[in-house]
Image (cartoon, rainbow, N blue to C red):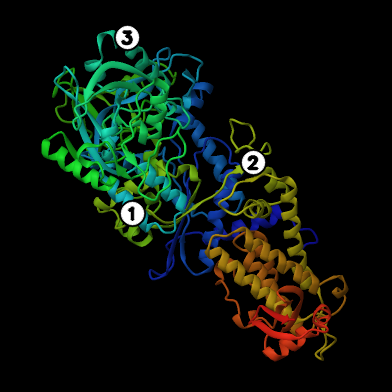
Amino acid sequence: MDERYDAPEVEARWQRIWEERGLFRAGLKPPDTPKEYVLEMFPYPSGAMHMGHARVYAIGDVLARYGRMRGRDVLHPMGYDALGLPAENAAIRDGVHPAERTRANIVSFRAEMKSMGFSFDWGREFATSDPAYYRWNQWFFLKMLERDLVYRRQGWVNWCPVCRTVLANEQVQDGVCWRGHPGVTQKLIWEWAFRITRYADALLEGLDRLTEWPERITAMQRNWIGRSEGAEVDFPVEGRDFSVRVYTTRLDTIYGCTYLVIAPEHPLVARLVAPARAAEVAAFAARMLRIGRTERTAVGQAKEGVDTGAFARNPFTGERVPVWVANFVLADYGTGAVMSVPAHDQRDFEFARAYGLPVKVVVQPPPGAAQPADPDAAYTGDGVLVDSGEVSGATSAEARQRLMAKATAEGFGRARVNYQLRDWGFSRQRYWGTPIPVVYCASEGTPEKPRIVPVPYEALPVMLPAKAVLTGEGDPPLAKVPEFIEVACPSCGKPARREADTMDTFVDSSWYFGRFLSPGDEQLPFEPKEAARWLPVDTYIGGPEHAVLHLLYFRFWTRVMRELGLCTVDEPARRLVTQGIVLGPDGEKMSKSRGNVVSPTPYVKRFGADTTRLFALFAAPVERDFAWNDSQVEGMHRFLLRAWRLSRRFAVLPRAAAEPGEEKFAIPTLRRAAHAALRKVTEDLERVHLNTPIAALMELTNTLSLCMGPEEQERPLREDERTALHEALEILATGLAPFAPHLAEEIWSGLGHAQTLLETPWPAWDPGLLVAESLVYAVQVNGKLRGEIEVPVTATREEIEARARQEEKVVAQMAGKTLRKTVFVERRLVNFVVG
């Protein structure tokens, strides 16, 4: 080895060797080889890679390299989530076509990932912007259309009246569009949606089997699906021939209902509002549409409402209750109307207090339970019914059953399971997305209601036109390209119009893990035999910000693929690893918009890829955030150089004569330290604890340094010492291999190995070396600690007690006193009770 460790040269050489030997390619081992599919959430190539990306891929790379050394057939692919709004917004801003920008960014991303030594199977690489990929988005769309899993509906969107276009949520801030135009409102438009709600129960039940997903993620999905069992009840509107239907999970509280609330955009509002209130209600509804759904229902948002002037009748009591509209009720959740029981719902209580509405208590805590102490809070628990007619005195559970039976028998109510989950609206008024493969034919329908005609499978893909009219204003971009939008109907051949909307990029990422199995397949999205081999993904790695939408769609799409015969699994990933974020130097999450991005490239050039990887892995446990710190990067670099220098020093130390010389270090101690480190690294890698194995390797390096310190440089090594040091250095190189693979290979090669570490089986530690030779006992007198003793593990109780009585402080405490008894806790303590 050279005097100086040349990281760029070493790393480039090993990357070349790995590639030439095809060591990252999956599927080359015998069919009965255990498989492991390691997948990181693929990146959006919006620019250069930063350390947030590097951390995710480093985690996956550690697991992939470790899996290979464990003898598994590892699939570790990489691709690009290349369609979407950021590239389109950048094109509008800079005048660069999204395809051109995306291609350039992918080239940059790929080069940076390769420079880090990530062990991706590059032969499976693809970008979702490739027609060969999004063709299958369209194929899935048609298959789902045949199964009535996709449909057209009207949905609310953000609308800028100045730009005359739909805006994404991130393009709106406080009612102002991203171009500075005020007056953004909500508009009802036609959109495409997937019937994900059909799978609500299956998705909910499946969470019980995801035992290797973080509990916080599965809890968030449960809450998002939001299954609840309750009742729908009709409240007849006074003086009208219709009712307001409400949904409630607390039918037991219906005798305490003092008002109804319906969503401002509910279609019944216009029919029931009193003429004198119409203008005020309309103005309130318009303001709510401008605010938007998310802000209206945000935690801590003030409760606002307007009295419609209408009254409904409680079907159980016959009492008149006023009907209000309020910001916290949404038209598409439940029935879009709620019965308000302010005594037993905190939100209703706050609204009643704000507007002077009555509060009627109908549930008391059960006997023996603490009474409500806060007069400014509702009692929301179950209890015993009071002032509730025929169910007074019943428990809440009993009352719900009896009231439900009555409502059902008399026809004004029914049991209902409800979900917070809504169908997935996926159409977007964008250019840079997958074209939706349908046309609208007026000849087979009418100009007002044209027939929707699917594009034939053999005509896929419907490709994006090269021409992109991107202004951010007016009609959707594709509607401005006549040669794309104007086509012949596939059914009748007469003039028709293509769909101008494109698919949301969540579609791309819902099934990409399957395309990696056979990315060149031209007959199916992927080969079912490959799916049988590789699915589910064994470890899926990505940020917790994707806990709900992406991961829910990911799971939904897998179920659809099973129904289509493409795979046999219900769940896409067995284990989910959610990493913390990397904070920039300013303590905020790294983001191009914040200008705090740290690129790995300068650090790779200065310190090497291994140092950069090691810092990203050592700075914090996988699931925790950490801040970028240059000084800690330098610390990792010093550790790696120390490991390399130790291996080099060993290589040049001379051998001793055959006769034994003076022992300079304890060989059993060194071997025990090496095998303890190997066990720690192995066990922690299995648990995806990645910072603690690095700490164990640092400790081993310290032990090696003590054994090969400066005083040993001139002394020849005996063969038994050389053997022990050689073994410890092999274990050090092996342990480093997943984390700092280039340096590990360099050390391994320097120890005389022709095969790479990736081709070398992971070693087993020797349990016999890890058996303790001594134990430490605490020594107490009358329960107070007076010292500690170290005794051989083979010592008898009598020997341990005799040794404990010799401790100086114990002798002093027992002097002149009578020993009453001795408390002996094996392997822990001795307590002398004296008096």
Q: Quadrant of residue 31?
A: bottom left
Crowding at dot 1, Cα within 10 Å, few <14 / some 14-19 / many 20+, comes out as: some
> Residue 642: where, in percent of width, then height?
76, 62
- Residue in the picture at 59% in, 47% down: 54
What kind of residue is marked 2? Ser
- Residue in the picture at 73% in, 64% down: 643
Q: Is residue 41 above or below residue 278?
A: below
- Residue 206 — which label? 1
Circle 2: element type: loop
Cα distance in 3D space between marks 2 and 3:
56 Å
Circle 3: element type: helix
Judged by depth in the image, the label closer to the viewer, 2 or 1, is 1
Residue at mark 3: 279
Crowding at dot 2, Cα within 10 Å, few <14 / some 14-19 / many 20+, comes out as: some
Please state if 516 lies on the left or on the right of 522 as rendered. right
Residues marked 2 and 1 touching at CB (< 8 Å): no
Judged by depth in the image, the label closer to the viewer, 3 or 1, is 3
Closer to the camera, 221 or 642? Answer: 221
- Residue 487 — which label? none
Please state if 772 lies on the left or on the right of 278 as rendered. right
Q: Is residue 232 above or below residue 439?
A: below
Residue at mark 2: 599
> If the image is split into quadrants, where does the C terminus sit?
bottom right
Q: Is residue 159 visible?
A: no
What kind of residue is marked 1? Gly
Please state if 793 lies on the left or on the right of 299 as rendered. right
First along the sequence among labels 2 and 1: 1
Circle 1: element type: helix
First along the sequence among labels 3 and 1: 1
Judged by depth in the image, the label closer to the viewer, 2 or 3, is 3
Please state if 496 lies on the left or on the right of 71 as rendered. left
> If the image is split into quadrants, where does the N terminus sit?
bottom right
